[in-house]
Each structure stands twice: as C-alpha cells, then as structure tokens.
Amino acid sequence: MRKDNMRVLVSLIVFIICFSCKEKKEEIIDIENKTVTDTHQTLNKEDEKQKLKLQELQERFYHIKLYDDEKSRDTIVGFDFLESDANLDYTFDYEPFIKRLYSDSISLYTKNIEIVFHKSKFEKNKAKLTYDSDSLNITQIDNHDVIGTEGIPNNYISKMYLDLSNNHVEIDKRYFEDLYEPNFDLTEAYYYDKEIIITMGNSDGYLGYNVTFFIDEELNIKRIIYIP
C-alpha cells in the first residue's frame, strides 16, 4: 500500500509541475504577442519610413517654354534634360497659382492647394561658418555650399509648408535651409499631373540662381538648383 501511495503522490507532483510549466509558457507567449502588435512601435516605423523618402519621383515629362538666344520655343522635356544644363532658361507652360506677397513670406494658392514660404534674417552667431583657407570668403554655412551671396547672407528661407485640402504638411528643412537671399517676386507655382511644381529666382545681383521643386502626391520631393 505504501508503494502504491508513493506512486500516486509522485504522479500527482509530476502533473502539478507540468501544468505549472504550461501556464508559464502560455503567459510568455501572450507577452511576446503584445510586444509584436504594439501600435506605438508601428507608428515609429512609419514615421521613420516617411523621413527616409529622398528625392524619388517617377519619370515624367513637362511642357515648357525654352528661351535660347533671345528666341523661345515650346517643347516637352523630362528630368534628365532639366538637370543637364546649369544655364537653362525656361518657364513651365501651365497656369500659375495665385500669388500673395507679404513682408517676410509668400502664399501661392489654387483651389485645394496652398504653398507658403517664410524668410528670416540670417543670424551669424547661430550658424557654423567655413572660410576659404586662402581668404576671408565663406565657402560653407552649416555644412552647405554657399549660393546667392559672397559674404554673410541677409536672409534665408526658414520655413516651407503645404496646405492640401486643409491638411497641413511641413516640409523638411533640408530642402530649403541652404537657399539664401530668396526673392519672392520671382517665385511661381504650378500643378500638373498630380504634381506640384515650384520655381524660384533668388538673389538680386550677379550671384543669382534658380531653384525648381517637384512634389508628387506622396510628398516625394526633387529639387534642381541652377547656378550659372
């Protein structure tokens, strides 16, 4: 009888231990599942994907008016042509947005789209300036090559955003923070084939340069800078 009782007791202990291990295993699985489906992590990953979008647009073609030797001609061109020559002189052959100018900003708008640029006074003490080793000329500001000015800039573009059917979209500063001496009088915007096109002619003097932005419906951005 004692042996039988001992066998029963041992069997009962083994059963209790196995059942306890099973419960712990199931608890661990539940915890792992909660970690995998954490919505905060998913949002962070999506935000990171959005930040990694870098000037990737599908190839398309544009109607432009090309000026050459004081003559103009209508033609259709792609990105490769627009990027091929720093001295290209052209305008897009589309209806421009309405333009409203303020002392330190510009609003370009059409039915469901508004583009806004702000400019600010350049503050030397808040910037990292790199000088030419042989002179006092500034070659870089905040690790960007200097365009539109020989010395300390007076103004720079400090903010750019879009309102798309009342959806506010801030544009990353890497697309505009190196654009010095903006001239909003020479800024235009167009809309073609689900894409926003913005052109700027900056700086008033002989160091003038042109900029063209292309922004598609997924907010991918490409920028071309023309420095004669």
Image (cartoon, grey):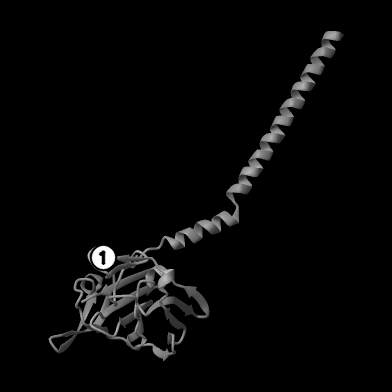
Percent across and percent down for residue 152 are: 34, 75
- The answer to whether residue 219 is visible is no
Q: Does 80 sit above or below residue 64?
A: above
Q: Quadrant of residue 59?
A: bottom left
Using the image as rendered, state which of residue 17 and residue 110 is in the foreground. Answer: 110
Q: Taking the image as drawn, is residue 156 in sight?
A: yes
**Amino acid at the residue labelled 1:** Asp
Q: Is residue 105 left or right of residue 222?
A: right
Locate the C terminus by quadrant. Answer: bottom left
SS at badge 1:
loop
Place of residue 189 in the rendered image (x, y in percent of width and height, measured from the top left): 36, 83
Quarter occupied by residue 83: bottom left
Q: How many marks?
A: 1
Residue at the image position 24 percent from the left and 68 percent from the top: 135
Whole-percent x, y for residue 41 in the image: 56, 54
Q: Give whichever of 76, 171 is nearer the camera.
A: 171
Q: Who is closer to the viewer here, 9 or 145?
A: 145
Residue 86, horizontal then vertical, whole percent:
20, 74
Rendered view: 193 above or below 109: above
Location of the N terminus (image quadrant): top right
Q: Residues within 10 Å of mark 1 (few under 14, many from 20)?
A: few
Taking the view exactly as shown, the residue that stands out farthest to the left is 69
Residue projecting furthest to the right: 1
* Residue topped by disc 1: 132
Q: Nearer the viewer, residue 179 or 125?
A: 125
Instruction: Identify which residue is drawn at 58% across, 48% down.
Output: 36
What's the residue at 78%, 17% (across, down)?
A: 10
Image point 47% across, 84% down: which residue?
112
